[in-house]
Amino acid sequence: RVLRAVGNLQISRTLSALAAQLRGAARGSSAEADVERTAAADVAFRSLGLRVRPWAGELESRAASHDECAAILREARANYWRCRHATGGDELRAALARAAAEVDAPADAVRRLCSVALRSCRAEVNLFAAFFGAEDCGAGGPSAEAASELETFCYPLRRAVRSVILGQWAVPTLCDVVHVLQAEALGGGAEGGGAAGTPLERVLRGLLADAHERLVFRAQAFIAEEIAGFNHARAPPTEPGGKLAEGRDGWHPTVRATLACIAQLHSCLPGAVFE
């Protein structure tokens, strides 16, 4: 009972009080004010981590042989993640909104959004380690609990990128988005992101699947409208991207448009799509 009271007072209550204080602060009227607010919140949490860490360390040292300490530690971690989802989640959503507003090209927007999310996820891993040590988010990857919480923390990225994907109609633009997710975000960012990369990779793979689905849908629409629906009496069909697929060198316009479409899709979609 005494241990639970100490754990509640020294860890859970102080976390909840700080989260309530930060959430009660008014969001700034400009991007610069929001950045300053986020930095101040990070400093406040890290300062609290220095005070909480000795208590959390004591619980961790006793958890393996003391069921009550293990239960208190689980409650403290669960409360920590509730507080971080409430405060850090708001900060990440604001950062993503600012990033999306800074660029116009969809592929550049996706690139910027993924970069912001990876930096935030890395910062979250370091902050968790300041409270509860690095064991749960070590070099071997996060524990199942930490990975699940970090994946939830990255959900704002899913919403932000999906809105970009679903707003695209042109096949070439969607191909560019797929290349960014596949070769840059997954191939270079998440896979080399350490403990932060593992949960983010799950979110990115879901987004890549969304981009593939949207690309297939728009390619099918292009084929139905410009190739299957080709009429010799009207203008030649357009290639993906709007360029007229006029017959040159003996190529029929629909053949040229089909080859142009397949050439763009080939490196963006799984081979099973073409079977």
Image (cartoon, rainbow, N blue to C red):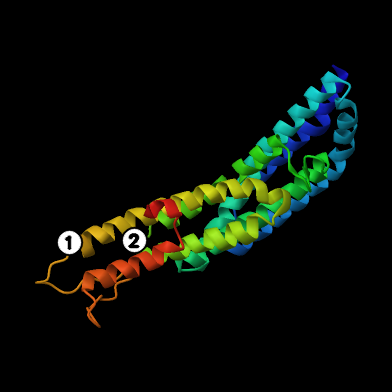
The residue depicted at 25 percent of the width and 83 percent of the height is: 249
The residue depicted at 87 percent of the width and 29 percent of the height is: 59
Q: Is residue 121 left or right of residue 165?
A: right
Q: Position of residue 121 (x, y in %)?
A: 67, 51
Q: Which numbered marker is on residue 219?
A: none
Amino acid under label 2?
Trp
Q: Residue furthest top?
A: 1
Amino acid under label 1?
Gly
The residue depicted at 85 percent of the width and 34 percent of the height is: 56
Determine whether 5 is above or below 21 in the image: above
Would you say the residues marked 2 and 1 are in contact, meaning their CB atoms lie under 8 Å apart? no
Q: Is residue 165 left or right of residue 258?
A: right
Q: Position of residue 4 (x, y in %)?
A: 82, 22
Q: Position of residue 250 (x, y in %)?
A: 22, 80
Q: Position of residue 180 (x, y in %)?
A: 53, 63
Front one among 182 and 134 = 182
Q: CA distance from mark 2 to mark 1?
A: 18 Å
Task: Determine the secondary structure under disc 1.
Answer: loop
Determine whether 191 is above or below 255 in the image: above
Q: Which numbered marker is on residue 229?
A: 1
Front one among 232 and 274 = 274
Task: Determine the secondary structure under disc 2.
Answer: loop
Q: Residue furthest bottom?
A: 249
- Res 224 seen here: yes
Front one among 249 and 92 = 249
Q: Quickly name the residue at label 2.
A: 169
The residue depicted at 24 percent of the width and 77 percent of the height is: 251
- The crowd level at tag 2 (other Cα within 10 Å; few <14, some 14-19, many 20+) is some
Q: Is residue 201 left or right of residue 136?
A: left
Classify residue 119 by image quadrant. Answer: bottom right
